[in-house]
Every structure is written in structure tokens, then in C-alpha cells.
Amino acid sequence: MREIVAGLAMTLDGVVDSPSGNWMMFDEEMAEVIAAGIAEADAILLGRRTYLAFAAMWPTLGRDVPMSAFMNDTPKYVASRTLDTVEWAGSTLLQGDLAGALTELKRRPGKNIQVPGSPHLVRSLLREGLLDRLSLTIHPIVLGTGARLFEDEKDRRRLRLVDSRTFRSGVVSVTYEP
């Protein structure tokens, strides 16, 4: 059975999206982690906000840009209650019973379903028991402001560490399973 695997970059203070911009430390080790996640996936799951941002950016980038071929050529599933259509090539809109649709996707043959970004969706998947793995790259910076991965969570949730690695840059890559 396929797994739904989320990958997010995060600051020490839990920020996953910040208007202050370019805070991620991208290097060879980070590229290896991303490439490994891509190699294990043959589908992408996105929330509405991330879909809109990615659909405006990725199709404009050349194939020489890392991840461009994966992002543009891989089937994309978009979870949204408000979008009526999706225009990015290879995108399918998931509306209504998201849990049922994702359970069906997981039953289909194939590799993992990768969730790049989409923190609101990741929280929802974790809460609904649909997320199989959560990979975080924790960057040694404190931003103070920005959207946090678990800013609205009220329920206690235990996760099990299944992998960790410290990069030369000080970034820590951790992978958890519920």
C-alpha cells in the first residue's frame, strides 16, 4: 500500500512559511534528502494555497531547475473546498470526502504520495490519521513570525522518530511516523 509522506522545512521556532523570505539553508545534503523523497514518490498531494503558489511558479521553470521535471510531470492531487478547477497540467481536484479519496489513492499500486509543503493539509492529514510519515528539515534560525506547523493544534499527538541526520550546515533532518 502506498504511503502519504510530507516534507517540510521548519525553523527552530516552528515557522514553516514566512513573509521574510529566503531563510532555508539549501546545500548538497539538503538536495540529497529532497532527491531521496522524490525517488520514492510518483504522486504529489497539495493543499489549495501551496497548489496556487506552485502552479504559478513551477510551469515557468526550465527542466534544468532541480525538481522541475518531478513537479511538472508527476500527477498532482489538490485538496480544496474552495477551488472549482485546477489548470496545472496533470492536476486533479479532490473535493468532498478527502479521507475516502486519499484512502482510495493509497490503495492504488505505485510509490509514495509526496506532500511538499502544504502545512494546513499536513495538520489535517495527521489529525485524520492519513499521514504515514512526516519529514522535517529543521533550520538553525529563529524568525519570530510566520505560519507555524502546529499553531492551532489542541490535541496531544505522539510521533515516533524513525530517522535523523545532522547536516554540516547545522540543519537537522528528522523523520517521524504517527
Image: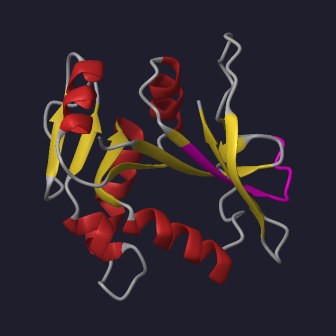
Q: Which residues are magenta?
A: 134-144
Q: Is residue 51 magenta?
A: no
Which residue is found at the position 50% from the left and 34% from the top?
122
Left or right of 158 in this view: 63: left
Left or right of 4 in this view: 11: right
Q: Position of residue 156 (x, y in %)?
A: 71, 14
Front residue of this view, candidates 89 and 129 = 129
Front residue of this view, candidates 18 and 136 = 136
Would residue 17 be visible to someone looking at this image?
A: no
- Image: 63 above or below 117: below
Quadrant in the rendering for residue 121: top left
Quadrant in the rendering for residue 98: top left
Q: Position of residue 177 (x, y in %)?
A: 59, 37
- Image: 129 above or below 63: above
Q: Which of the image's four quarters has the C terminus? A: top right
Left or right of 11 in this view: 86: left
- Image: 60 above or below 148: below
Q: Residue furthest bottom?
A: 64
Which residue is found at the position 34% from the left and 59% from the top?
41
Q: Position of residue 132 (x, y in %)?
A: 47, 36
Would residue 176 be visible to someone looking at this image?
A: yes
- Image: 123 above or below 144: above
Q: Which of the image's four quarters has the N terminus? A: top left
Front residue of this view, candidates 33 and 19 = 33
Which residue is found at the position 28% from the left and 75% from the top?
69
Q: Residue furthest top?
A: 154
Image coloring type: secondary structure
